[in-house]
Image (cartoon, grey):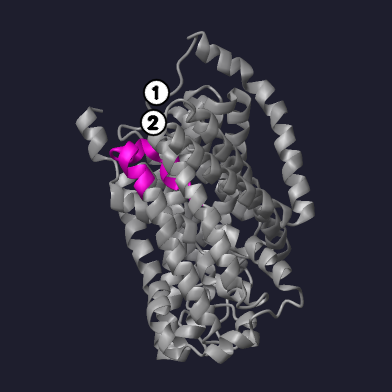
Amino acid sequence: MTPQTAESNKIGLVPATLMVAGNMMGSGVFMLPANLAVIGSISLIGWLITIVGAVSLALVFARLAALDPAAGGPYAYARRAFGDYIGYQTNLVYWLANVIGNVALITAGLGYITHFFPPLQDPMTFALAQVAMIWLLTYANILGPRMVGRIQSLTTSLVFIPILGTALFGWFWFDSQTFNASWNVSGKSNASAIMATLTFTLWAFIGVETASVSAAVVRNPSRNVPIATVGGVLLASVAYVLSSSVIMGMLPNKELIASSAPFADAARLALGNTAANIVAVCAAVGCIGSLGGWILLVGQSAKAAADDGLFSKAFAKTNPKGVPSVGLTLVAILMSLLVLATISPSASQQFGKIASVAVIMTLLPYIYSAIALRVLAYGKIPQQQYTLFTVILLIAAIYCLVALVGSDGQQTRWSLIFVIATVIFYALILNRRRSVEEKHWLPGGPEPKWVQYFTLGATVTALCVFFWFSVGQHTDLELRLRAPQPQVSNQQSQPINH
């Protein structure tokens, strides 16, 4: 692959910015107003605090990317600052958290359209639809980062239609009395209520590191990655605060708490059922489309570690477009198995807990990255900037630690056990790392020729099987409009914010 070809396959500033915003917003933005309604409109203060922490994290990753625009994001920074073991631990925790979180994301996305397409209410059909979407978006990634960038730009734009539409025009139906009446319905003190808000709003900014992880597929990364990181966070922040606040002034608190589609309910109140249907479709497309960016993220993180000998060398093999296609194929297989293992309702509930653990685990790489900035920036930036960023990174790290304190204790404990267990896996991979150092073998190389054909075959097969189960096994295929009270399929697990 020539340098000109490699550069043409990369994404520019706008797609990178939309990828950051889209990966963060994911599925959770459409459920946030209902989640926060349990606490009340006092959550507005929690949003402002969270935005300070999120912007601090964005500035940390932007500064790290400017210092060293290497692929790998949190993994690369933790390894350079603290050594191979912490780098390996960061990558394994981050990689696994995102693999599991991706399954929750596709579950939430398809859950929005189950009411329109009745066959999806069947657990097996729903699972096959998930598998089909996983392989379709994996194949899109294998075609190149530019393809994923186009998909992400389109789907993120669709997400912004209902969110920004609500944020800008919902104020015509905003009732200050409705907003004030639900100020604090948690039964706790104002301070405790705000603290509880942070545990919800934090998840809305998971994905702030997207551009830095994918630096290898971004044009001019030393310039574009920092801008995309900060720009994506600010774009998402405005959408979050305005849309959540206006909906709390449109819908009575009890109705909002019970809502399974708060944006659709708000659109129905303002413009009728047709608008509610459009919002539901945009939510589904946005969730599913953002999966493409998260699959790219998982592949690039694993490739960066594999290039250093700290992950299986299969994840370092690339196709002519520089995509780690073997690693993406392995991830798609793992995600498909996770979907099939969680078909039953009880398994889905259990998976929801596992996915929550995965999101908690994401905070550890964030903390490592924040502290790594102080190590990596030493002597490389002026003293005044160094002092300023020391304050910023401390705010980001404290913000993550506070969120951990507010998380479920049992889930946090199991996450800690997994983190400790990474030392066992690291011992097993040390010999591979030594082989790289001694030049006995080099990681990476071209992908086997069968990989792309296998991925295409798996995509077509999954789509055909889903089509057979959804069309061939059902006689009632009438597409239905959403009823006045929107409902989400029981197969949808609790959405996890990316």
Q: Looking at the image, is 15 positioned above or below residue 194?
A: above
Pointers 2 and 1 in contact (C-beta within 8 Å) = yes
Residue 371 vs residue 19, the one in the foreground: 371
Asked if residue 407 is among those painted magenta in the image, a careful observer would answer no
Decide whether the magenta segment is chiefly helix, strand or loop.
helix
Write the residue at 43% across / 85% down.
Answer: 171
Give the numbered dot on residue 172.
none
Residue 411: percent from the left, percent from the top? 75, 52
Residue 84, relative to residue 39: is it above or below? above
Q: Pointer 2: what residue? A: 318
**For residue 212: magenta?**
yes
Residue at the spot x=74%, y=42% of the render? 416
Placement of the N terminus among the 4 image quadrants: top left
Relative side of 107 to 2, left or right = right
Residue 450 screen position, x and y as percent: 40, 34
Q: Quadrant of residue 96?
A: top right
Seen from this angle, which residue lies furthest front? 384
Picture layout, residue 333 above or below residue 380 = below
Location of mark 1 (residue): 445
SS for callout 1: loop
Q: Is residue 70 visible?
A: no
Q: Secondary structure at mark 2?
A: loop
60 or 21, nearer to the observer = 60
Q: Is residue 139 left or right of residue 181?
A: left
* Side of 355 where 282 appears, left or right: left
Residue 170 % position (x, y):
42, 83
- What are the residue bounds of the magenta stretch? 207-227
Q: What whole-number distance in Å separates the C-alpha atoms at marks 2 and 1?
A: 6 Å
Mark 1 is surrounded, within 10 Å at the Cα level, by few (under 14), some (14 to 19) or many (20 or more) other residues, namely few
Q: Is residue 417 visible?
A: yes
Question: What amino acid is found at the position of numbered circle 1 in the picture?
Answer: Gly
